[in-house]
Image (cartoon, helix red, strand yellow):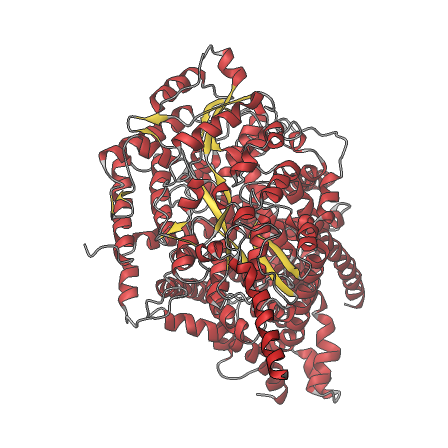
Amino acid sequence: MRRIDYLFLIPALVVLVALVALPLGQVFAQSFTNTKLLAASKQFVGFANYLKLIQDKRFWNSVTVTLLLASISLVLQVSVGLGLAIVVQKDFVLSRLGRSLFVVPIVLPPVVVAIVWRLLFSSVLPGINYFLSLVGIDGPAWFDHGWSARFAIIIAHAWYCVPYVMLMLLAGLESLPLEPVSAAYVDGANGWQIFVFITLPMLKPVLIFTTIYRAVQALKIFGLVYIMTGGGPGVSTEPMSYHIWRVGFAAYKVGYASTIAVMMFFLILVIVLGMGWYGRRTGAIR
Amino acid sequence: MYQTKLHRAVSWSALTIIFLIALVVFIYPVYWLMTISLKTLIEAFRTPPSLIFIPTFRHYVRLFAQEKFLLYFLNSIIMSLGATLVALLVGVPAAYSLSRGTFRGKNALLFAILATQMAPPILFIIPYFTVYVRIKLIDTRLGMIIIYLSFTLALVIWSMRAFFDDIPGELEDAAKIDGASDFQTFARIIVPLVAAGAVAAGITSIILCWNQFVFPLILTRHRAVTATVALMKFLAAEAEDWGLMASGSIVLTLPVLFFSVLIRKFLTRGLIAGALKG
Amino acid sequence: MKKVFLLLGIISLSLLAISPCWSGGQQSGPAAVEEPAEPSEINVLLMASAAGTGLNDMLADFESKHPLIKVKELTYAPAADYDTKVELELAAGGGAYDVIWATGRSYSRWALSGWIVEIGPIIKDPKWTDAASFNFEDFLGGSLRFLDVEGKLYALPILNTTQVMFYRGDIFEKFGIAKPPDTWDELMEVAKKIHTPEVGAIGMRGSRVRGGVMWPFPQVLYGYGGRIVKDFPKDMHPVFDSPEAIEAAEYYAELLQKYGYKGTLSAQYKDVSLAMQQGKMAILIDGYPGVGPYEDPEKSTVAGKLRFHYVPGGPAGRWPAFGAHGLAITTGSQNKQASWEFVKWTLSTERQLRAGLEKNEMALTRKSVLIHPEYLKKFNYADGELMRVLAEQFDKQVRSFYRPMTAEWGEVEDATALAMSKVLAGEQSAASALKEANKELYEIYKEAGYYKE
């Protein structure tokens, strides 16, 4: 390892260890106890919490909800984000306008995004249901039923995250070398072929990294759910992080909450490892 | 390009239609928010929404009459900029090493960095709170910058690594032959090439910090309160003030909007220069 | 010789110091309350809510009365996670705030943890409180009983509230409904007649969040003879799955599913409030302090059309909702006397009346304010009908017990609200959902040590 690598890496590692690894370690240790928030004593209970977790129906429900919400949102985010990045990258009149305007959602604080979308999905205000009524559809009471509540959260979440993806992919697209593309045109390929066989493969590293990062963020979804549905109706929109919050801060069982957090951590780890393996297999990651 | 005129016309119009639909989808919610901030409540929520209206500024007047709103605003700015600058300063070099370096455990390290982001932030609040109270970092801007660093740094490293990966290794070899040191190569040659990526990562980081809610809610008391927390106050349990919430939201987003438009201008200029060079 | 003078001097000085205390009850001059002798600063934390708003504007009044006390910080924290934030602060020593808002939900836990100061002795101590001007009996009895924890008082009420039935006079007239319903069964009948898809017959909260469905539902539950626990506070075994409770839950679900406005099944307070303002329902049963926006022509399309009535009763009688929040002094405070002065001022008749007249606050806690002619004149909705309904309801129908407010109430509310939410969404039958919830309640209370089995 070169000397410069030490210089460059150590500060970052120090920060990350102190700010993240240590608290994570504490959470991990806490998962083996039955600590209550603000209580004086705590007891070591070994794997009892983990056994309890495996039998916890509500936990497994939260896993299902998390995977459902995150996966559909991710698909939407990446596809729409890529599409917008391409549209905005092309040099036509509106593209510059597009760059500024499509970024707008991320400018809003997530709290506000949640509130606005809550208003938009409300049955009493001129929001989504109003627009649906213009084409003759009688929109449901979105938050009253499980399937529609989930749909609402996915839409709001994807809406909020698309600009992030677009930004990253746009930067990626713009840093791609031009020669392969012009060469392909000379060879007679059309736009679609160029995109699929030349641009996309070159974009793979940025694409995969962006997807993985957004996936990790999506699996941690919390704020939107907290404000839009409170996990309801029933537990149909209760993801893992909300379950942790409930157990830890609403029921004060910090020890058990840590256990759920550790499980969530491993779950995300497994998913990301899977994505990384796929990335390496397709040659996108070195 | 070798496409027929019809082909071009069709693709242009298809593009424009997609563009317009996307525009409506992405802008309408914000537009609606803005109308709520400029109308009386009864007008704002009327079905069907009125497109033409006489704006009223009372919600904005009331917003600035709220005590300390400017202080909260300033706090948000300082914390976001501070955490981002430190993250870039520490993270960009680290990402470079993680891209170029050839040492054992590199991939493991990379993965570990991503792994630090996999835990739900809510559980961090308790250890941070107890430690901060003890070392008196609670309710301080510095304390908040430090905690923001816990996620901005990973974001910067993760994003920048991809951009460094895109730069071919020949550039550094050429520089070395010319006698440049590792550091000079990095600073003079490599960094300018990833400027676009750094800016993108920086914007994302600033916005992420700006929008934080849970951490400032618990870890501040009076002095370091941020604008997002102040915003939630306007939505008190018993007395919804949608107009104030809307005007507060709009004012909250203005600096970030302005900032990112400015950065976009810089980005475009940088890219044109890059294209000419390349 | 000098010694004698010295002794005389000391005796006379001490006589002067002691004498006000001797005069006991009857005091002719200003109160003998000891003002803090040195300048002190206090920090106040309040929850953004329907009472105690805009205090920053009124502080000049407080500071003119107590020149040596400075309110350094007066902050309003959002209601979301208020309890969590305060508990973290209190557990860490609590000295950061001197006076805090104590929510009805967490109040007993904070009291039992020793984080807030017992108020009873302070009220009785003439050095701290002048009984005559403080007028303790002026506080609503129900609120004081609500804030009683094991026979002791740890906070004074700053907000108390109950629910009423708001109904659209114009819609009732249109459908020929002569008088508002008095029982839940009658309500179902009326709802059937007046329900239309555009304007639902009824709206009540249905959300599973705290402060959601479990705010109005116990009114139905108790009206049908159901309970959450068998005999609060003596027997804490949960009976949430009793036949009466199931009947109440089925009623609630049927009412809202069939005749509720679109969106009531998942509604929180802000949703029903907005829906009422938009004229989407004919009847609303919810907290009365919400009336302000409904009658405000700049916010509401139904201003001036509302009439008011009591919350309906069931076979087991009427049981209207009741809730209160209090103002407490933290044990960690270094300036308890100054804090007490602040509490007294905030809850004084004068300040509360000002809040009512200037800030449109209705959930005030002193009788003298609630019957004050100016207050009555200002909140003269439907020619004073609301005030009459409230007076009668507070006086005769409200009981101070509405929900078992123990330290575990938060978890209990979560479990019961979740069950109701499932029933409302049609995901589970009332019988099975309530049974599941009851099992959870059993575990919660058992773990808290109320019983061994």
The residue under the point 71% across, 46% down is B63
Picture layout, residue C23 above or below residue C206: below
Q: As drawn, is B269 to the left or to the right of C83?
A: right
Picture layout, residue C289 above or below residue C30: above
Residue B214 can be seen, yes or no: no
Q: Position of residue C301 (x, y in %)?
A: 61, 25
Q: As drawn, is C327 to the left or to the right of A38?
A: right
Q: Position of residue C438 (x, y in %)?
A: 26, 45
The residue under the point 62% across, 44% down is C351
Residue at the limit of the structure toward the top, as seen here? C176
Q: As drawn, is B129 to the left or to the right of C433?
A: right
The residue under the point 28% across, 70% down is A45
Q: As drawn, is A249 to the left or to the right of B213?
A: left
User: Which quadrant would the N terminus of chain A be assigned to in this image?
Assistant: bottom right
The residue under the point 56% across, 51% down is C27
Q: Position of residue B216 (x, y in %)?
A: 58, 61
